[in-house]
Every structure is written in structure tokens, then in C-alpha cells.
Amino acid sequence: MNSSTTIPTSAASTNVFDIGNYTTTLIKVEGARVCDRNGCNPPSPRPLLICSPSETGFFPVLLFLHGYLQTLSTLSLSDTLLHMVSSLLPPRNNNLQMHSLGADATEEIKITAEISSWLSEGLAHFLPPHVEPNLSKLGLAGHSRGGKVAFALALTKSLKLSALIGIDPVDGMDIGKQTPPPVLTYTPHSFSLDGVGVLIIGSGLGEVRRNAFFPACAPKGVNHEDFYKECCRPAYYFVVKDYGHLDVLDDDTKGIRGKATYCLCKNGECREPMRRFVGGALVAFLKDYLGGNTRDLVDIREGHAMLPVELQRVEFQV
């Protein structure tokens, strides 16, 4: 096995907000046992979508948790995942078909922990030939309720993480109406993560109601701003102006649930710029905290990068 992690340092496209030059593949894992010449792997605890490079290498891994009611059939974050993998090359696991209809996220936290434990024995069986996962470089990310689950699991310190990412994380309906188990304590810098790097991306329209019939999808008091306030250094915080909570999803989100993503939240004019920013910002952050290449993240932080969106807030603790 290789001793160093593969992180590209140069490519024909140097803009992290553009699709990269590496070949990517989406692999559905339905939970069944897979056997090869090296034996049989334990079945995955839940269906997964693996987004992997095809090139030879020893790559970091990002476990990505979807938002509430998103499912394997919608593939609603595939464009963002493919953007990241084409530029950064980590095998990524999008944990799907996980959320229950209830408010309590305890079972989802447990399932995510089980999947994390499965990675060391099961992941390599599903990757393309010559792609090796480096689980000593493990990132955990989540969108919406998935962001809450990611932070809740990270705070147990049961995983050895190199990076933690919340994309418009939400901890409930309002202050005093957090869904169990509550993550926010409303105590500044209370998230004790032992130096794990944190990135939080918020949507400027997430706290705005679409109409009188639907609540805001990322309500003020339980959203990205509150998560960032409780972070310790190192932490980065970007809020995207004029885009909504679900604008990180693919344009074509299938099924009734997929169509509902255009009706439930206050949205921007189109999703593509938000997806490009989220994909590029995650690439820049992971290049830094998984690969030690700080240039792109510093460029975003200092306002030197050509962004596909306008940022209404940029804050950091380093």
C-alpha cells in the first residue's frame, strides 16, 4: 500500500469552481455482501452511493450525509459530488436512504457511526481497481439535517476525523424547538473537536420563508450562523447571498420528493452557481485539511478567487 495520499497539486484547470480533469464514477451499494479473490466483505449497514475517481492512487475519504427526505432514487447531490471528486480525487460515500420521517435523529447518528466502522473492511471491495482508500484522512460532511448528524457524531469523538463540513446545517425548527438530540448549546466556542478543521457554508435565503404556508428551511436561531458561533479554531464560514437552502441540489431532482425541493424553500434564480461554489469551496477546504495545500482556501478567504456567487459573510478562526 502507498504511504502518501494522492492529492493533485496541478491540473489543466486551476479554478476549483470548475469541473476537474479526473475521471469519476458513481457506484450504488445496496447493502449486499460482495466477494472477490480477497474474500467477502461485510454488507453495508445502509444503501450507499460511492463517488470515486478511476485513476490509480491512495486517496482520502469523505463521508457525505444527505438532507431530510432525500433518497437514493433522487441522486440529488450527484453533481456536487462529481465536481469535488473530479478535482480532488477522494473516494466519497454519499450515505442515502437513511432518514426516517420522524424528528429524532438519534437513529441516523447511530447508522452513520456503523457506516464509518464498515469503511475499513467494506469500502475497498466496491472501488475501481488500483483505487485505495486512506482512512487516516477521513472527512465527514452533511447538508441540512445531515449537517446536524455530522456534527452530532463528530462531537462524540468516536471517529478520528481530519475535517468536518456543514452545508447549511439545521438543528430544528427554532430556538427552543431543536429536534432531538439537540446539537447547539448556545454557548460560544462550545464545540470541542480537538483541532479538527471545520467548514460551514450557509445560504442567505435559507432563513427566509417561501410563503405564508411554509416555514423557513434553515430558520434563524438553529442554522449555519449558530453552528459557526459554537465552533473553535480552525473554522471557516461562508454565507452565499441570494441562494436558498436547497440550491445545492441537482437541477433534475426526480420523483415527488425531488419536485417538492422547488416548492418548499425560498430559492435563488438557478442552482448551478450555488453548486459550483459549494463544490469548489469543499475542494479548497479539503485540499488544505486533507492535503496541506492552503492556496485555494486562502484565496477564497481573502477575496482573491473568482467566485460563481456573491458572499454576504466571510469569517474564519485560524
Image: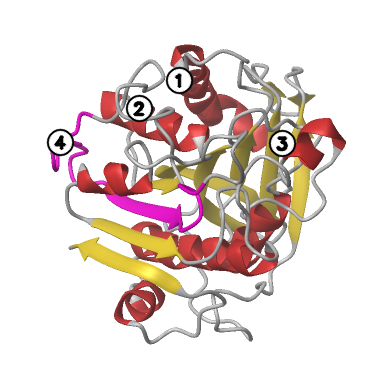
Give the alpha-carbon distance from disc 4 to disc 1, as whole Å: 20 Å
Q: Residue 190 carries which label?
A: 4
Q: Earlier in the sequence, mark 4 or mark 3?
A: 3
Residue numbers of the magenta segment: 185-208
Residue at the disc numbered 2: 152
Label 4 element class? loop
Establish if 211 lies above or below 174: below
In whole angstroms, how far apart are the C-alphas of marks 3 and 1? 23 Å
Residue occupying the point 68% across, 17% down: 43
* Residue neighbourhood size for the residue with mark 1, other residues' Cα within 10 Å, grouped as few (<14), some (14–19), many (≥20): many
Task: Give above or below for 196 relative to 39.
Answer: below
Residue 19 visible to the viewer: yes
Pointer 3 residue:
126
Residue that numbered label 1 is attached to: 109
Residue 143: in magenta span: no
Residue 184 location in percent, x, y? 27, 30
The image quarter in which residue 220 lies: top left
Q: Distance between the residues labelled 2 and 4?
A: 13 Å
The mark nearer the N terminus, 3 or 1, is 1
Is 133 drawn above or below residue 153 in the view shown?
below
Amino acid type for the residue under numbered disc 4? Ser
Q: Which of marks 2 and 1 is nearer the N terminus?
A: 1
The residue located at (28%, 29%) in the rendering is: 155
- Prevailing SS of the magenta stretch: loop
Give the CA separation, mark 2 to mark 1: 7 Å
Q: List x then y, in percent, for residue 71.
A: 73, 30
